[in-house]
Amino acid sequence: MIRTNKVSKFFGGVKAVDNVSITFYDGKINGLIGPNGAGKTTLFNIINGFLKPDEGEVYLNDLRIDQLYPYQIAQLGIGRMFQDTRILGKMTVLENVMLAYKKQTGENPWKLFFLNNKVKKEEALIKEAALKWLKFVGLEDKINTYAENLSYGQQKLLTLARLLTAGSDILLLDEPTAGVDPGMIPIILKLLRNLVNEGKTIILIEHNMTVVLEICDWVYFMDEGKIVCWGLPSEVLADQKVKEAYLGLRMIIFW
Amino acid sequence: MNYFFHILIMIAIYLILTLSLNLLMGFTGLFSLAHAAFYAIGAYISTLLMVKMGFNFFLTLPLAILGAMILAVIIAIPSLRLKGDYFLLSTLAFQIIVFSILYNWISLTRGPYGIPGIPKPRIFGFEFKEIPQYLILAGSIALLISLIFKRIYFSPFGRVLKSIREDEIVANALGKNTTKFKISAFIISGGLAAIAGSLYASYVTYIDPTSFTLDESIFIISIIIIGGAGNFKGPLIGTIIMIFLPEILRFLRIPDTIAANMRQIIYGLLLIIFMRIRPQGILGEYKFE
């Protein structure tokens, strides 16, 4: 469970996140929706430690995490998929995914040379796990290409495989289906549902309302840094404020 | 023939230097101007222990590595918290400090007079005295370091270093303590450079601080830029080209005074040309931007 308590973040005079108290429950797909610039990604950055909140606290269960470094938060089991794919371009697809595996003995240079056998055995396991997820997202025939040579949709799938190999318990997904081949979307959604059934927690930023309706258990609607309303997806999407924000004048001007 | 072997020995020594710097520049994406300083620390620790205390070369080698690693820790911990250009500046400061100490601490290093009479390596009564024998020693050590490099390249450790080069934020988001990894890379890189220093000192049997100037650091960086960074073949081809190049000038019968200047001009031109038209070097896997 991730809980924020009266979290605010200011950029200059702009309140990107404004006094947000929100709870993301375990074993659910929590949707976070709202127009561009609502502060959704900023909230993600606060949760996984890239930004320190100016006010308020963030808790993982009862542990306060907003003062930790991003890598510590990741080690606690909070994984992040970025909106812009952020693949490691000059590394192979396989390397991109194998990197994500947690607690690798061979990451310690001394153990690398003195516990060579252990490292090699572990490498085989890591490779197996990586290949399993690469196969799942359909990239198994691309494992030796540089990640930068993949199409945008494939890069997105690569980051999904990376996240799954990391094995985090809480997944922060920033538009996982954007730019992905439409045929792939139902498969991803089914996977997300399975992950939640296995006990993982998903927090999902999503612009595709069909996806939100189909998959989210609970939805928070965010606008201008505030949580405006929340509830079941059908309720939230029917809310007058949400309709205004998405369909109203402001969005037309924005477009 | 000995002349050719001499060039091969220099290639072996510089291969150690470029591979160790490649760990920083090519893997981790960190530019360091202090590589000649670690080279110097290796050379001076070995030399002083051999000349003043009569140590065996092979005993001084681990001590030289250790000395360089300790100094690497001292510089890495404050500087690696700095980002980008500021890290580069702090390595520049370190390079200048080391040079100044070697140049001015005359009671220990004899400063600009240098230290002559450095003994050749000796093991079980066998002395690596002649050039072909020394080539075997330098070649074996270079080979060993190439193997260490290869092991790191295909290891989880190397993978994390590369991810820092590609996108440090992602590495962080995947739970990697990137500061710690950068410090490790810096320490290993410094320790390996010290080996090259020890080898050089006992090969030429005379050292003075002018072999370890900022120019030397820049020269090692140029080898990587021209050869290519990240993998093994880039630094190898770069080292071969950059060590052979001045020898070609010698064959063209250009007088030494002109050749020395010509060399600098050619290095400069090569750098400009490569940065302009082939920023990944001849065989590199990574573009400098």
Image (cartoon, coloured by chain):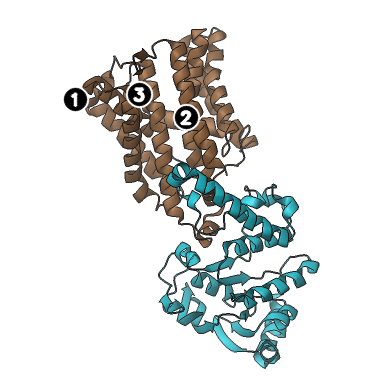
The answer to whether residue A238 is above or below residue A216 is: below
The answer to whether residue B3 is above or below residue B282 is: above
Mark 2 and mark 3 residues within 8 Å of each other at the beta carbon: no
Q: Chain of mark 1?
A: B
Q: Chain of mark 2?
A: B
Q: Residue A234 location in percent, x, y?
A: 70, 89
In percent of the image, x 64 and y 36: which residue is there? B278
Colour cyan, chain = A
The circle on residue A67 is: none
What residue is shown with label 2? B16
Q: Is residue A97 left or right of residue A57?
A: right
Of B281 and A231, the residue lying toward us: A231
Of A30 and A37, the residue lying toward us: A30
Circle 1 — which element?
helix
What is the tally of numbered marks visible in this picture?
3
Q: Can the viewer see residue A53 in this picture? A: yes
What residue is shown with label 3? B210
Structural distance between the alpha carbons of marks 1 and 2 = 30 Å
What residue is shown with label 1? B107
Of B166 and B139, the residue lying toward us: B139
What type is the residue that disc 2 sits on? Ile
Mark 1 and mark 3 residues within 8 Å of each other at the beta carbon: no
Q: Residue B5 location in percent, x, y?
A: 50, 13
Structural distance between the alpha carbons of marks 1 and 3 = 17 Å
What type is the residue that disc 3 sits on? Thr
Q: Alpha-carbon neighbours of circle 3 within 10 Å: few (<14), some, or many (≥20)? A: some
Q: Quadrant of the C terminus of chain B?
A: top right
Q: Earlier in the sequence, mark 2 or mark 3?
A: 2
Q: Earlier in the sequence, mark 1 or mark 2?
A: 2
